[in-house]
Amino acid sequence: MEHLNALKRLAGAFFLAFLIGLIAFSAQDRSGDKISRRLRDSIAESGEESLFTAWVFFVDKGPNPAQRLEAVEASLKARALIRRLRHRGPENLVDAYDVPVYAPYVERLKARVHRIRHRSRWLNAVSLEARGRDLIELADLPFVLRLQPVGTSTWHDPVSEPKIQARKPIRPLDEYRLDYGDSRAQLELMRVPDLHEQGFSGKGILICMLDSGFNALDHQALDHLDIVATWDFVNNDPIVGDETGQMGTGSHGTSTLGALAGFYPGELIGPAYNASFLLGKTENTDWERHIEEDHWVAGAEWADEWGADIISSSLGYRYDFSHGESGYSWEDMDGDTAVVTRGANIAAGRGILIVNSAGNEGEIEFPLSTLIAPADSPMVLAAGAVDSAGRRVNFSSVGPTADGRIKPDVMAQGTAVRSAVPSARDAYGWVQGTSFACPLTAGVAALVLEAHPAWTNLEIMQALKSTASQADQPDNRMGWGVVDAVRAVAYSPTAFYPPAEFGVRRLENNYIFFIQYVDRLHWQKNPLNHGQAVKYRIYTRPAVERLQEYKMLVELDSTTFTYDNRGLLDDEAFTYKITAVDAEGHESPGAYTVSR
Amino acid sequence: MKPMRRVKITVVMIILISAAAQTGRAEIHIGMRFGQRSVFDEAVRDAYGSGFVYQPFVRLTSRRSPLGLEVAYEGGYKKSADIGLFDEVGILRLWGVEAAAFLTRRFGPVVPYVKLGIGYYAYSQEIESGFIRLPVDQKQQSVLVGGGLDVILAGGLYLTGEFKYVPLEVAPHGIPVDLSGYRFVVGVGFGFDVLPGRRIREVD
């Protein structure tokens, strides 16, 4: 009997030891899981003593975040309140995204890290600099959800000099009230002077520009601007121009601002020269800029606080980063993965219209695209570059997104763009890149919003896309085409909208001896329709047969659906169109996507 | 000249020389072998796997020469599997006709041999789907190499076992598929003299 008891005790001790081991192993496993693979690999490669820039995401916003919503609502600036009322209604002014990061969590991190860079209430995270060893320890904290590297990238502007070609004016020089000087062609391409003639100039619209810095704000074409606020997110001070000993030079921002809102008749006029501005310096170098996404997210949150209507961002994060450890893969360019894209989506959900350059990476073999984040977001208007004749320039990045949506969205002039340069108060130059197509597009968006102040950001996007030069046959090189300001203002937003986020994925159907392909279509209910759509119709035609009529494939009553047209060969590409149909049989305009 | 073509020409030459060797005292064998064949291609192997084969054969040998000739048919491999994105039913069939020369030497009742030949192989894949646009029903030549052992029982009857390798890389629609594989087969054969009544390979 004594032996039996001893045996039982021994078995019990073994069981207990096993249980403790299991728990310890599980706990270790969980903390390991909190660190993303890319960050883990970086730490392993560079050593635990090296300094890393990382996001730390929290599990929650501390106790009773709902109680803090009232304080958040009370703290909204007047402009932010108005914009949110327009976009979200009085019942939904604020939500959990608006609740600040729980301060005690940040305080506990502070003691263990080199520096806290930014707090993001939208992402419920902080970006920080810390040694690898400390990051591994942070993963053990119970309120830490996940750690991942801050995405970085090198932004390239086109290196070749723009070829300046005198363009024959569309109208006689004295046709307009304003003398556009050399900036006339870039505005005429988008029919902006016609809106200026009607009195639109962006007045009352608050635009936030996120760029590498803004020198020479006393430039003769910029000194008229109403600059509401400035902030340098790299150096954490309000000075957005160059400062001795600090990172960043600001020529690029000066030129993007000049293209959008410069005003010096005879030399330069931007499309929205009467708009108000927030200037955020979010990057730290000049023509080849090393950029980090946490600055961008911080800038977008700042823009939201001030009540910005539009963000014009001539920045982006490529997937083929030189710093591979902190980069994203092409598959991440799906509109919902890159942190900067998620930030942009949240900003758009608050009613901010985000215009982002598509990128200057040219074309690459299908299906890989050369988009930059956050241009991959369905909520971001990605602007590509054309020349003054409306032809795509070869550096302009192409789509599709990784989930098959057409990008870029629209095009504007991005070569031989006339703008201000900061070398002197009266200095002007020719600049190029989608960096400049972006502010020109944002300027038109401001005019449309000025004309239709009740429109939401999505309605403005819809208006710009639906009225652009190739709206009936969009593709992944030029999207919906060159922006047409006059038609966009005349667009009727009360129309019935097509489904949102219409995309296609070409899937391999591998039969071993051969491969056929399947185009799998997907889309979402469009919130602008407020439940009106009861059915969806899908049409198709071969992508190369641009004159051929679309043939209806199917009518569905589900809000999402996968359509499989099996048996495609590799070289067959199709353009798909989808429309929404309401209960009375009214059909919306089409949304389009192409399978190659 | 491509190496494979050179090999095929060599094989044909050997077969012809073997045929020439059967000038007198010729003996005919008929038999049937059964067994398994493998497929090297990973995708085919994963989907369909190895399979059963049968090989009826006819041999011509001579008492005056260690060389012999064999003509055989290889069939029986017919397997189905769910393939593609939609798990559609695919049926793969592999078969072929072979001619080979073999070199043999008798050690009492045991007769080992090696053989080298050429084959005309066919493969087809049928898929139960309304969306298939590319047919897979092709034929291709290749060489074969193998060896085996006959064990003579009595009265011209013998057991036979064979190992054979056939390289067969195909690409009917540009995608290379390696249908090469080994065969492990056993069977029975019966040999008799070309002149009626004279049986060969009797147990000493």
Image: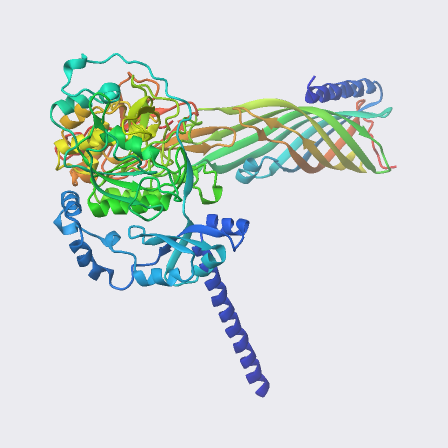
The residue drawn where x is 53% and y is 24% is B174
Residue A371 appears at what percent x and percent y?
37, 33
- In the rendered image, the vertical position of residue A175 relative to residue A405, given as above or below: above
The residue drawn where x is 32% and y is 19% is A391
**A509 to the left or right of A474:** right
Q: Residue furthest bottom?
A: A2
**B132 or A566: which is nearer to us?**
A566
Name the image quarter holding the N terminus of chain B: top right
- In the rendered image, the vertical position of residue A546 relative to residue A244, given as above or below: above
**A91 to the left or right of A63:** left
- In the rendered image, the vertical position of residue A227 relative to residue A12, given as above or below: above
**A134 to the left or right of B192:** left
Residue A376 appears at what percent x and percent y?
34, 36
Residue A65 appears at what percent x and percent y?
24, 60
The residue drawn where x is 50% and y is 38% is B81
The residue drawn where x is 22% and y is 45% is A350
Image quadrant assignment for residue B20: top right
